[in-house]
Image: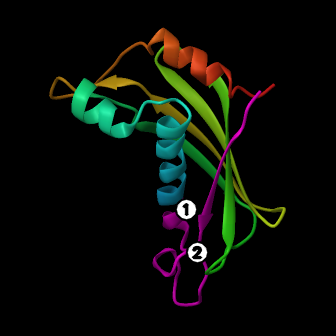
């Protein structure tokens, strides 16, 4: 089982006036991690999805537990694994840590959708993508 890691440095733009990460900014960093995982590891960039193939992976659900604050210039390690693979969705687990201290945990459900109609419609994952997901599935 593989894990995807993306290290992100906490920037000024992520923080409140006290230099602590403002919680909605974590969602932007989580999305960046998912987007980079698709591009780097699955060879399926958001540009290819949205602009060429007219499909997408919107977040249908996200559950987040904040464990400890993060601060300006912290280097956060975002660890992503696949929890389960459905016919039209995938459940991801993320753990974010800094210097071995857990900062947050998240569970995310992404749905594969066609963007070719006014209202996006869920569609089946391509078999090759399902196989790539399986490499990151947790035990």
Are dots 2 and 1 in contact, CB under 8 Å?
A: yes
Q: Residue furthest right?
A: 100
Instruction: Please name the residue shown 60% across and 23% down the image.
Output: 133
The residue under label 1 is 26
Q: Position of residue 139 (x, y in %)?
A: 81, 25
* Chain-order first, disc 2 or disc 1: 2
Please tell me which residue lies in front, 5 or 123. 5
Q: Secondary structure at mark 1?
A: helix
Q: Is residue 78 left or right of residue 130?
A: right
| Image vertical order of residue 14 relative to residue 66, above or below | below
Q: Secondary structure at mark 2?
A: loop
Is residue 90 covered in magenta? no
Q: Is residue 25 left or right of residue 19?
A: left
Please tell me which residue lies in front, 36 or 94. 36
Q: Position of residue 73 (x, y in %)?
A: 63, 79
Q: Which residues are magenta?
A: 1-26
The residue under label 2 is 21
Q: Position of residue 25 (x, y in %)?
A: 50, 66
């Amino acid at each position: 089982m593989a894990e995807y890691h993306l290290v992100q440095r906490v920037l000024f733009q992520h923080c409140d006036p006290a230099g602590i990460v403002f919680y909605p900014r974590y969602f932007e960093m989580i999305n960046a991690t998912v987007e980079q995982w698709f591009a780097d590891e699955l060879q399926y960039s958001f540009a290819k999805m949205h602009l060429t193939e007219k499909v997408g992976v919107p977040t249908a659900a996200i559950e987040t537990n904040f464990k400890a604050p993060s601060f300006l210039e912290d280097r956060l390690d975002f660890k992503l694994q696949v929890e389960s693979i459905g016919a039209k969705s995938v459940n991801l687990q993320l753990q974010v840590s800094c210097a071995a201290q857990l900062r947050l945990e998240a569970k995310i459900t992404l749905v594969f959708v066609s963007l070719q109609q006014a209202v996006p419609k869920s569609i089946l994952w391509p078999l090759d993508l399902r196989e790539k997901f399986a490499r990151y599935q947790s035990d």
